[in-house]
Amino acid sequence: MRKFSFLTLLLILSLVAAACAAPAAPTAAEGTAAPAEEAAPAEGAAAEPIKIGGMYNVTGGMSSIDDPGLNGMRLKAKEINEAGGVLGRPIEIIAIDGKTDQTAVTNAVSEMIEVHGVVAIGGLNDSTYALAAGPVAQNAGIPFVTAGATLPTLPEQIGDYFFMEPFGDDAQAYAIADYALSELGGQTAWMLVDQAYDFTTALAAFFKERWEAGGGTILLEDIYQSGDTDFSAQIARLNELDPQPDVLFVSAIPNEAGITTRQIREAGFTQPIISGDGFDTPLIAEVAGDLADDVYFSTHAALDNPDPVVQDFVSAYEAEYGRAPENAFAALGYDMMGLIASAIETAGSAEPAAIRDALAATQGYVGVTGTVSYPEGQRKPVKTVTIIQVQDGVYSFAGEATP
């Protein structure tokens, strides 16, 4: 009897040891669990969030347009979540500051994908940074929707997972050239171009093309490097022109928009200053002060537009942040988030490949900055361009066009 009990005890102990040594059921982290969108959460459990990367430069030279862009993105995500989320799941934005540095942007996108597991990324308002970030997402098979980068060749350069929410530089350069020729009576122009950015050089090239096609003449094309703070040499060369140009075209990123405006006006030049959406920044009024007048630029929306879609956004932004939207880039961030969420809803899936396919098929998505439809085989929409006038530091709607 005593011997039987001992053997039984040994058997029991061996069974317990075997059970402890058996491999645990695989976890989602090991890559064997069903995709989150295919698994229903237990009753009463919170749904797993859909993680979307918010790639913006909220510090550095792009901060005056990227910080509002991220705010707009967050606002739209909050509204979506308050309405029940997407596919019954909340949106979670993974935001990492790119610091207006290409290496930091590239590293941030890698972190979003490899560490946080985002299924799509949106953001960036400059083409140089989009060209740094886009290939990382493309190689990982993660859709990237730029909110405000406008180099028209971006989708072709980066690949089929890259989409533009805005129009291209060709459209906005043509629009401001047409406006200056027809509405400002310009026939001759001086050009000042930042040589450091794909955006500024492309915008200038498209402006010159349209200006000369419309019968205008470029009297002088001058240059500078991003980060310059003294434009006295370029202004001296402008002063030597005889006759003087009718308009002054400045192709700049936001950081230099206010500085160039102030120094041109301080030197006594009163001609209209014209530009693209790099001038859609509060820095014109903040830096140039009462010299911020007769400035015209092309951009993505007029926030004083009485359209209910625009005014509902403006009211929501004011309620959320305690101030009016700083510029159209806030609206672009809002629209970009809505566009991604719409694609997820349409796809019925948060799988990156399904999101990409739904984005490519987008037709008639109505946003604050216009309606987004992608022509067959293209990932750049055709949208209306808005012209804004700055007079005595006040920004107001001046016109619109679809070149």
Image (cartoon, rainbow, N blue to C red):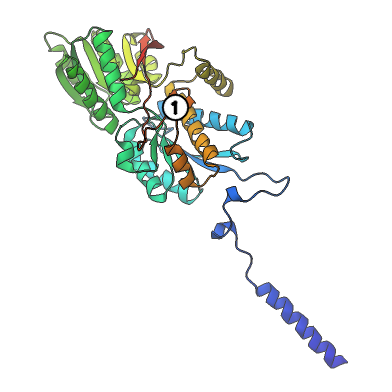
Where residue 222 appears, x then y in whole percent? 17, 22
Q: Residue at x 31, y 22 (%)?
A: 172
Quarter residue 251 falls in: top left
Which part of the image, by quadrant, shows the C terminus? top left
Where residue 168 appears, x then y in whole percent? 32, 28
Which residue ends up furthest to the right in the rendered image? Answer: 1
Element type where label 1 sits in the image: helix
Where residue 392 appears, x then y in whole percent? 37, 7
Quarter residue 121 falls in: top left
Q: Residue at x 43, y 42 (%)?
A: 143
Q: Amino acid at mark 1?
A: Leu
Q: Which residue is mark 1?
A: 332
Q: Is residue 197 visible?
A: no
Which part of the image, by quadrant, shows the N terminus? bottom right
Question: Is 225 situated left or right of 131 in this image?
Answer: left
Where residue 180 appears, x then y in whole percent? 26, 12
Which residue ends up furthest to the front in the rendered image? Answer: 376
223, 401: nearer the viewer: 401
Q: Is residue 120 visible?
A: yes
178, 254: nearer the viewer: 178
Q: Residue at x 50, y 18 (%)?
A: 310
